[in-house]
Amino acid sequence: MKLYRVGGSIRDEILGLPKGDDDLVVVGATEQEFLSRFPGAERVGKAFPVYLVDGAEYAFARRERKSGPGYRGFDTDADPSVTLVEDLKRRDLTINAIAQDLETRELIDPWGGRKDLERKVLRHISDAFAEDPLRLYRVARFAALLPDFTLEAATLELMKRLVAELDTLSPERVWLECERALAARAPWRFFTILRDAGALPVHFPELHALVGLTPGPDRYHEGETDTFDHALRLLHRLPTADPHLRFAALCHDLGKGLTDPAILPHHYGHDEAGVELVTALADRLKIPNSFRLAGELAARHHMAAAKLPVMRAGKAVTLLRKLRRFPGGGIAGYLTLLHADSAGKERDLTPLAPEFERILDIPLPEKYHDLGPKSGEILLNLQAEAFNELREKVLSEPNK
């Protein structure tokens, strides 16, 4: 029995990136032989032998043959005769098909993964790449994780062949790849590659509707090619890697995809129109409620929130109460989104977030408790007065 470390941890170690959990491959052993060496191992694999030993995952080397649609449509053979090279050949990219002998520490690299790491290229191993539709999303995620890597043209062509089977993927699996991409160094590349592969309409039709659509008047969107480009540029400008904030950025202008062509380049009412599209996207991919809320708040309020400095005080306080719930960093996160959306052309209100929080923390005096709806009105008025004071001191002075 031989044991090898494989995959992502080796790739990241070579690149000098933080190394994740080790994945190990078992070659030349039956399950009984493996269990006699690791008697406490817990089997977790269903289709083929995969065991957990002290938190590490040991998968038996296997061959796969396409037998049906989707990423589960494979017949698997984990016989002891399966070689390491056969196991590595079924992987997606050359940079993920490097192994290390646990005894000798020798690197085994039959598909040129180390060379591709030097060249900074994402390249498939064989045409069998096009048998698993999940690989389209995985490669797009690796492009987001490794922004200085280029995607080989031949690999992109194989990805285009996978589009026909994307609807066989579970929505949870698609969202997992998307969420990982949102936390990566260059999340915009995930969606750019989906567009280039022709994959956006399958699971992200709301984003696809923004491709080729004017983002708005030139004075607000100078240099942007379309509304899709506007959303990705916004992702690029965000100063933090918060995935909720990034998802909100993707969602904020979805409503523009419903604009009547007769009123272009304007998109009147796209803020409210976008909420139903965020809901549709979240329902389709079974997106967690925190992301759903981030997207809905971004779509519904981004136009109104940009007018906070001139908004009626009571209305401003009511809006700030809603933005406080924003999963992408509360009020401060939402104001960060607004400033990035304006490409820095509008005043940055983010430094005022603590003042807005202070206003919302003003309590209702005890003597006004238990007055029913009147209590709420009194509290709103008190907080509105504080907002007006802030406006007079700071909001009305554009250079502060």
Image (spheres, grey):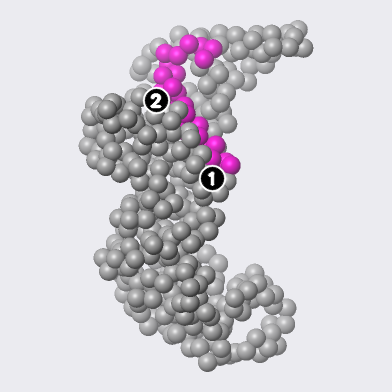
Based on the picture, tell me whether residue 290 belongs to the magenta stretch. yes
As drawn, the label of residue 4 is none
Q: What stretch is highlighted in magenta?
A: 289-315
Give residue 164's position: percent from left, percent from top. Answer: 39, 62
Say which residue appears at 56% left-offset and 84% top-offset: 78
Residue 279 seen in the current view: yes
Compare marks 2 and 1 and give the one earlier in the sequence.
2
Task: Count neighbours of disc 1 (C-alpha within 10 A) and say few if under 14, some if 14 to 19, many if 20 or more.
Answer: some
Q: Does residue 121 lie above or below 299 as drawn? A: below
Disc 2 on helix, strand or loop? loop
Say which residue appears at 32% left-offset and 68% top-offset: 158
Q: Does residue 118 lie above or below 308 as drawn? A: below
By secondary structure, the bulk of the magenta-drawn segment is best described as helix
Give residue 151's position: percent from left, percent from top. Answer: 30, 63
Residue 237 seen in the current view: no
| Amino acid on which disc 1 is placed | Asp
Q: Name the residue under label 1.
A: 283
As drawn, the label of residue 269 is 2
Task: Count neighbours of disc 2 (C-alpha within 10 A) and say few if under 14, some if 14 to 19, many if 20 or more.
Answer: some
Q: In this image, 142 relative to 380: left or right? A: left
Placement of the N terminus among the 4 image quadrants: bottom right
Q: Does residue 78 lie above or below 397 as drawn? A: below
Give residue 140's position: percent from left, percent from top. Answer: 38, 58
41 or 295: which is nearer to us? 295
